[in-house]
Image (cartoon, rainbow, N blue to C red):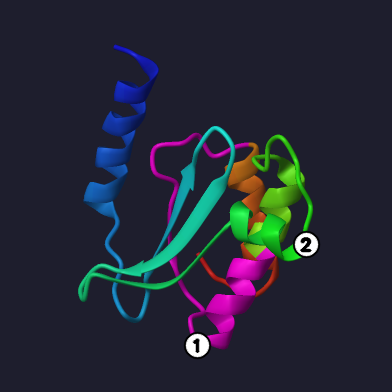
């Protein structure tokens, strides 16, 4: 089984257990080769309440880097997502790591979001 198939199997297992509601939406993380994407989703209504990526952070700061998928960008992304969510009245979320291991940028992003007001 290749790497992507293993991640998709883990993702499916995780998503069977997690469900985002209006009171506790799902915070989904996706990593590409270059960027990190985070969305806060209400699965009942099927809407994205807020979302952000490292692309938006790089455009905002006018910084260019070969990769924006590192720990420094993950910290800033976690802070910005938490601030946006708290300003929209979202305090509690269910963390969906999308099959990625909970270490590195995923762990750093989660810790930064917790530090700035989100509860998992």
Q: Which mark is residue 61?
A: 2
User: Farthest top residue?
Assistant: 1
| Mark 1, secondary structure of its residue | loop
For the N terminus, give its image quadrant.
top left
What is the x, y in percent for residue 70?
Answer: 70, 40
Q: Residue 18's quadrant in the figure?
A: bottom left
Q: Residue 45's quadrant in the figure?
A: bottom left
Q: Earlier in the sequence, mark 2 or mark 1?
A: 2
* Residue 102 sits inside the magenta stretch: yes
* Residue shown at 50% from the left, 86% from the top: 88
- Tell me which segment is drawn in magenta: 79-103
Residue 112 shows up from this direction: no
Q: Which mark is residue 14?
A: none
Q: Which residue is mark 1?
A: 89
Left or right side of 120 for 42: left
Left or right side of 109 for 33: left
What is the x, y in percent for residue 75?
Answer: 72, 55
């Amino acid at each position: 089984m290749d790497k992507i198939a293993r991640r998709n199997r883990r993702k499916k297992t995780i998503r069977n257990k997690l469900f985002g509601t209006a009171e506790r939406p799902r915070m989904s993380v996706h990593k590409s080769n270059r960027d990190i994407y985070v969305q806060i989703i209400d699965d009942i209504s099927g809407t994205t309440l807020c979302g952000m990526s490292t692309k938006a952070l790089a455009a905002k700061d006018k910084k260019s880097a070969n990769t924006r998928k590192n720990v420094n960008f993950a910290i800033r992304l976690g802070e910005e997502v938490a601030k946006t969510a708290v300003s929209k009245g979202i305090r509690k979320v269910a963390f969906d790591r999308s099959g990625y291991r909970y270490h590195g940028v995923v762990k750093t992003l989660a810790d930064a979001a917790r530090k700035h007001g989100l509860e998992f």
